[in-house]
Structure formats: C-alpha cells, structure tokens
Image (cartoon, helix red, strand yellow):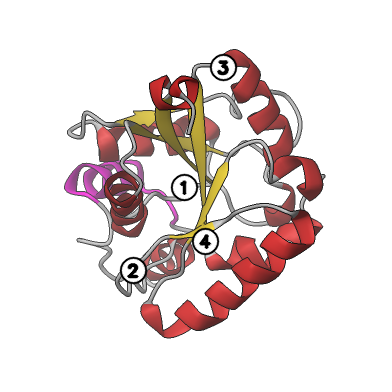
Amino acid sequence: MSSTTKDKKKIGLMGGTFNPIHVGHLMLAEAAYEQFELDEVWFMPNKNPPHKQGKFIVEDTIRAKMVELSIHNNPHFKLCTVELEREGKSYSVDTLTFLTKEYPQVEFYFIIGADSLFQISAWKNPDIFLHLAHFVATTRGEKDKEMVLDQITKVNKRYDTDISYLSMPCIDISSNLIRDLMERQQSIRYYVTDDVYTYIMEHQLYKR
C-alpha cells in the first residue's frame, strides 16, 4: 500500500431506504467500522431506489430524521444526504462517482448485504461501480456464510474486483418486518432505538 493510500481517510458507506432504520443497521455499521478499521461510517438514505418502486416508503425528510436520531450518540456515524439532494432515481454508480470526485482524499468502503450481492449484475454499470470503492458484503447470519463467500468469489472473478466478507452474528430484523408489526399493531420496541421508537409512535408512522 502506498503512503498516499495510507494517508487517506477510510469511510464506510451504508446505503438504504432506512424505512425505518433499525438496530440491525447499526450493528452492521459498527461491525464494519471495527473489522475494517474505518474512520467513519456514513448512512446514506436512498431517494428513489429503482429496485423498490411501488413499496410504501415514508418521506425523505422523515427517513433522514430517523437516521439522525439513531446515530447522534455515535461520533463515528454520520448522515450523508447526497442521494436525497439529487433529482431522479438513486443509482449507486452515480453516487459513488460523485463522492470519489468530491472527496479524493477518502478511501470508500461500500457495505452491501447478501441480497444486493446476488443482484449486483442487475445494477447499473457494475463493471464501473465495483471499481470505485472497496466492497464489503455480509449476511444476516453465519448459516449463509459459505453461499455468500461462493458468490463473492464469482463476482470477483467476473468483474476482476476484490469484495471482502464482513462477519456478522445472526440479526433477523428487517425494515419490512417492522412495518408489518406496525400494521398489525404489535410492538417494535427494541427493534429500533428508543429515540426512533418515540418518533414513530408520535408521528403515527407505518399505520394504515
């Protein structure tokens, strides 16, 4: 590694709708921060994710606010609103192209889940996208580790890239589950931080 690379700040990027953000997202970010010795992790809410058209997504400002409420006590977690500020659909290749030009002194680590890893060929310009940052892939539990590692090998070979694996304990939580619980009027306490729980309850989010 060159001295130039050593001098660069290492920042993890976690994109997502965060609809809502939950403790699984925070645990994933903390694991990436620790295992890859990152300086910061930026949470990057999507505006109009192409793969989630038609799903019930609350307003941009509300999702960004919930991210802020979740991370405000952690000095190495930051909110990045670059996708919310851009018009049109959110394509990761466009976001990464912008960020690498805007922050040439930063080495970005793009964190993705197993679902994204298996769909990566369907993303916009994966041959470009996968060379704009270090990619880190994970799964919700070790039971799928071998399958994910096998897919990492295939993607690395196909696109001549070097995706790393992020080891995580089993976290069977999803934003979809939280929305379903809310619709059924069941508790979501401890699935999200206390501040986000209070915010959701006060604003009656995810109730139809």
Amino acid type at image mark 1: Phe
Nearer the observer: mark 3 or 1; the answer is 3
Amino acid type at image mark 2: Gln
Between disc 3 and disc 1, whose residue precedes?
1
Q: Which of the pair 87/186 is nearer the observer?
A: 87
Separation (CA) of disc 2 from disc 4: 28 Å
Q: Which residue does the numbered mark 3 point to in the structure image?
A: 104
- The residue sitting at 46% across, 69% down in the picture is 139
Category of crowding for the residue at label 2, using alpha-carbon neighbours closer than 10 angstroms: few (below 14), some (14–19), many (at least 20): few
Q: Find numbered disc 3 in the image and state the secondary structure of the residue it sits on.
A: loop
The x and y percentages for residue 47 are 62, 36
Nearer the observer: mark 2 or 4; the answer is 4
Residue 128: quarter of image: top right
Nearer the observer: mark 3 or 2; the answer is 3
Between disc 2 and disc 1, whose residue precedes?
1
Q: Which residues are magenta?
A: 193-206
Contact, mark 3 vs mark 2 (Cβ under 8 Å)? no
Between disc 1 and disc 4, whose residue precedes?
1
- Asked whether, in this view, residue 34 is left or right of residue 89, the answer is left
Separation (CA) of disc 3 from disc 4: 26 Å
- The residue sitting at 64% across, 57% down in the picture is 55
Q: Which residue does the numbered mark 2 point to in the structure image?
A: 185
Between disc 2 and disc 4, whose residue precedes?
4
Residue 98: quarter of image: top right
Nearer the observer: mark 2 or 1; the answer is 1
The x and y percentages for residue 196 are 27, 45
Nearer the observer: mark 3 or 4; the answer is 3
Q: Which residue does the numbered mark 1 point to in the structure image?
A: 18
